[in-house]
Amino acid sequence: MRLRIFAPTVEVSAHCDLPCGVYDPAQARIEAQSVKATIEKALASDDPEFKIRATIIKEQRSHLVKEHLWVLWTDYFKAPHFEKYPDLHTLFNEATKLAGAAGTKGDWDVAKADALLAKIDQIAEIFWETKKA
């Protein structure tokens, strides 16, 4: 029994409970598109109940954007990627902040949603470049 407690372990990392190796920035982009559409529809509405529902959805989807980006940032991209693309950490930091309280999660600014989508597109471009190698 004691030997099993101190036995070496194998470290595994994945974005879910099964290390499938499936990563795609499209997941973050789809959620960000939903955020932008929700902002636009809420701004066009005079219905207070609709705006409450839109707020909840916008905040949930913004959080999902952050989660999808974090998975890419922490699980997919490795040291060689960050060496080849030195601005990658900054891109992820800026994107997750744009999806956070100072960005789409806490604001109704369509320009912030557009900026978030642009950052995700930049990350996706680098992601697909790494897949070619």
Image (cartoon, helix red, strand yellow):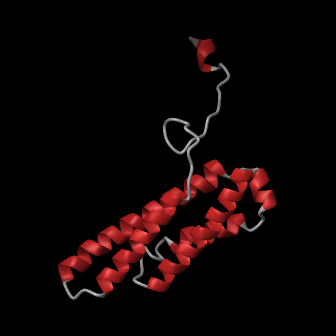
Indicate whether 100 appears above or below 79: below
Looking at the image, is 129 positioned above or below residue 47? above
User: Which quadrant of the rendered structure holds the N terminus?
Assistant: top right
Whether 41 is drawn above or below 35: the answer is below
Residue 49 % position (x, y): 18, 78
Q: Residue at x 39, y 83 (%)?
A: 108
Q: How far across and how far down the image is residue 103, in percent? A: 49, 77
Residue located at (66% from left, 64% from top): 125
Q: Nearer the viewer, residue 130 or 66?
A: 130
Most extreme residue toward the top is 1
Q: Is residue 131 left or right of residue 107?
A: right
Residue in view at x 50 percent, y 81 percent: 112
**Residue 107 rendering spot, x and y as whole percentages:** 42, 81
Question: Number of marks in the image?
Answer: 0
Residue 63 falls in which quadrant of the image? Answer: bottom left
Determine whether, in the image, residue 47 is placed left or right of residue 80: left
Please identify the quarter of the rendering in which residue 61 is found: bottom left
Name the outermost residue toward the front. 132
